């Protein structure tokens, strides 16, 4: 598979490194508005560099692309790739509106190309360890999930487009909340039927910088998500409370199962875990292009966007929103 990357920002190097580790894949093109960014991601791979993504799509150099750009551009880039018969892995969030998610899915289905959304939580080693333990059934039913992440939404501390609602679709919820929803809905095992949320706009930011979401899932599982900016230390912890024990996962520490006063280490985090997650994700993309059923459905990716938008409505009205 000859693969191109569109958008050579913070996360592009993980995709490029993953592509370099897959024998049947070759990075052949990279595009960014800034030529030097594209060249930096292309590195010594020999990939051609572009500043116009349409030129990359029309180059004849790629069979598939990774769309890795500001959220508001995902739809147009995915549709343009599908129109040319190219398979697409698009970064999370799938898009900024449910209508855009539906349009992307419909266009790709009609064109007969694969569309996968990079819901990376499904591929991170410490989260896979959680899912394996839940599937083993030893802990019984999942009852309650607490998910907390710190971030930094002070203007100036991330690319400017993250603060432009038209381009980002929102702030901490749309970006970081999407990760929390990805894993919480996965481990919770059902879609959300209601959300009650609060948001804060600190640091004079034009998008939310912090927030809480309380979800009720269709199977009765209660999910609580908290996101706070500018913490003295980074926190990224999910606690899955079950009938007969609980599991805690943190990408900097690992995955720990607690049952009857005893702790079992399910996964010890290592410095290569993030790279491994991006490798697993790209291997999954290659497998789906080859005909395998996807681990992460478009329905899941679209539901995440739907819940975030409902959370914005809830924060505005101060009441729970049914989904
Ligand atoms: N999976 C993860 O863990 C993870 C982590 C961070 C970001 N992301 C997602 O990855 C995507 C990109 O985020 P980022 O942090 O890399 O952002 P970024 O701002 O660092 O990079 C975005 C890049 O896109 C380029 N770009 C903008 N418009 C373009 C256009 N028309 N054509 C070509 N290039 C264009 C910009 O020049 C920039 O280099 C977002 O969807 C984000 O939510 C995912």
Image: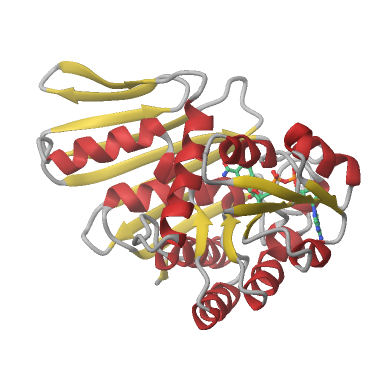
Q: Is residue 218 visible?
A: yes
Residue 122 image position (x, y, % from top left):
40, 45
Residue 86 image position (x, y, % from top left):
61, 68
Residue appearing at x 71%, y 49% in the figure: 28
Residue 168 image position (x, y, % from top left):
70, 58
Q: Residue furthest bottom?
A: 110
Between 132 and 230, the one nearer to me in the picture: 132
Residue 243 is drawn in which quadrant?
top left
Between 12 and 246, the one nearer to me in the picture: 12
Indicate left or right for 14 with 264 as reference. right
Indicate left or right for 254 with 202 as reference. left
Indicate left or right for 50 with 260 as reference. right
Residue 171 image position (x, y, % from top left):
66, 52
Indicate left or right for 141 with 228 as reference. left
Vertical arrangement, residue 292 with respect to residue 154, above or below: below
Question: Considering the image in quadrants, where does the C terminus appear?
Answer: bottom left
Residue appearing at x 68%, y 36% in the figure: 13
Q: How many marks?
A: 0
Residue appearing at x 90%, y 46% in the figure: 35
Residue 136 is drawn in which quadrant?
top left
């Amino acid at each position: 598979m000859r693969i191109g990357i569109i958008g050579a920002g913070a996360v592009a190097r993980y995709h490029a490194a993953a592509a370099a580790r897959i024998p049947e894949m070759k990075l052949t093109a990279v595009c960014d508005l800034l030529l030097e960014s594209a060249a930096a991601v292309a590195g010594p791979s020999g990939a051609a560099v572009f500043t116009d993504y349409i030129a990359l799509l029309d180059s004849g150099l790629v069979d598939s692309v990774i769309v890795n750009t500001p959220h508001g551009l995902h739809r147009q880039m995915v549709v343009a790739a599908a129109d040319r018969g190219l398979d697409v892995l698009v970064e999370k969030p799938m898009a900024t509106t449910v209508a855009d998610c539906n349009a992307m899915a419909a266009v790709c289905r009609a064109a007969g190309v694969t569309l996968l959304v990079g819901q990376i939580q499904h591929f991170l080693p410490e989260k896979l360890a959680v899912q394996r333990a839940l599937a083993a059934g030893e802990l019984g039913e999942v009852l309650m999930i607490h998910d907390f992440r710190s971030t930094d939404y002070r203007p100036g501390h991330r690319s400017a487009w993250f603060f432009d609602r038209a381009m980002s679709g929102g702030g901490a919820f749309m970006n970081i909340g999407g990760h929390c929803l990805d894993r919480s809905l996965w481990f919770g095992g059902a879609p959300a039927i209601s959300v009650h949320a609060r948001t804060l706009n600190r640091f004079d930011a034009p998008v939310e910088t912090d927030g809480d979401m309380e979800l009720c899932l269709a199977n009765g599982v209660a999910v609580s998500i908290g996101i706070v900016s500018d913490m003295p230390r980074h926190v990224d912890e999910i606690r899955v409370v079950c009938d007969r024990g609980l599991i805690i996962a943190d990408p900097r520490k690992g995955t720990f199962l607690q049952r009857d006063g005893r702790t079992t280490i399910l996964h010890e985090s290592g410095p290569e875990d993030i790279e491994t997650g991006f490798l697993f994700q790209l291997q999954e993309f290659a497998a789906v292009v080859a005909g395998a059923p996807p681990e992460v459905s478009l329905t899941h990716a679209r539901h995440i966007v739907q819940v975030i938008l409902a959370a914005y409505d809830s924060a505005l009205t101060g009441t729970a929103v049914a989904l």
